[in-house]
Image (cartoon, grey):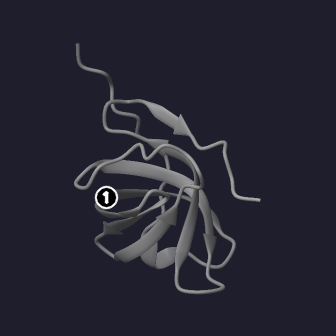
Amino acid sequence: MNMPTVVLSQSTLIAELSQEMVATIAVVVESIHDRDEFRLSDESGQVLVYIGPNHMPVTAGDQVEVSGCEDTREAMAFYASEIFLPDGRRIILSLTYN
């Protein structure tokens, strides 16, 4: 049985992200860097995504949509709150570092 792919009505390109901006980006998972971070890319650039102390729900090559908040105090970093997987599942990242 094929699950429908969740497509959100509006997504932002990585290059359009700005400090403390809440957004959804439709991207490809480039690589997994650590147990709590992975790199995403789209046609406009790349961004490092942090998921906190949650289970890593993606693998390299996945086409996903990620909702969260941009934080540019350091290098460009996006803090994910939700991930929409290609099979239609929605992952809510409820755990955060204190």
State the image coordinates of residue 90 (x, y, percent, origin top left).
49, 34
Which residue is farthest bottom? 74
Which residue is farthest top? 1
| Above or below for 73 versus 60 | below
Q: Residue at x 42, y 30 (%)?
A: 89
User: Which residue matches tag 1?
Assistant: 29
Q: Residue at x 23, y 13 (%)?
A: 1
Say left or right for 83 vs 59: right
Say left or right for 52 vs 13: right
Split into 4 quadrants, where in the image is the C terminus?
bottom right
| Above or below for 39 versus 55 | below
Please count the marks in the image. Answer: 1
State the image coordinates of residue 22 (x, y, percent, origin top left).
65, 62
Tell which of 45 and 33 is nearer to you: 33
Tell which of 28 and 93 is nearer to you: 93
Q: Residue at x 59, y 55 (%)?
A: 52
State the image coordinates of residue 51 (x, y, percent, origin top left).
54, 55
Q: Is residue 8 visible?
A: no
Q: Amino acid at mark 1?
A: Val
Q: Is residue 54 visible?
A: yes
Determine whether the residue tagged by mark 1 lies in a helix, strand or loop. Answer: strand
Tell which of 44 and 98 is nearer to you: 98
> Residue 57's image quarter?
top left
| Above or below for 25 versus 64 | below
Say left or right for 63 vs 47: left
> Residue 2's image quarter?
top left
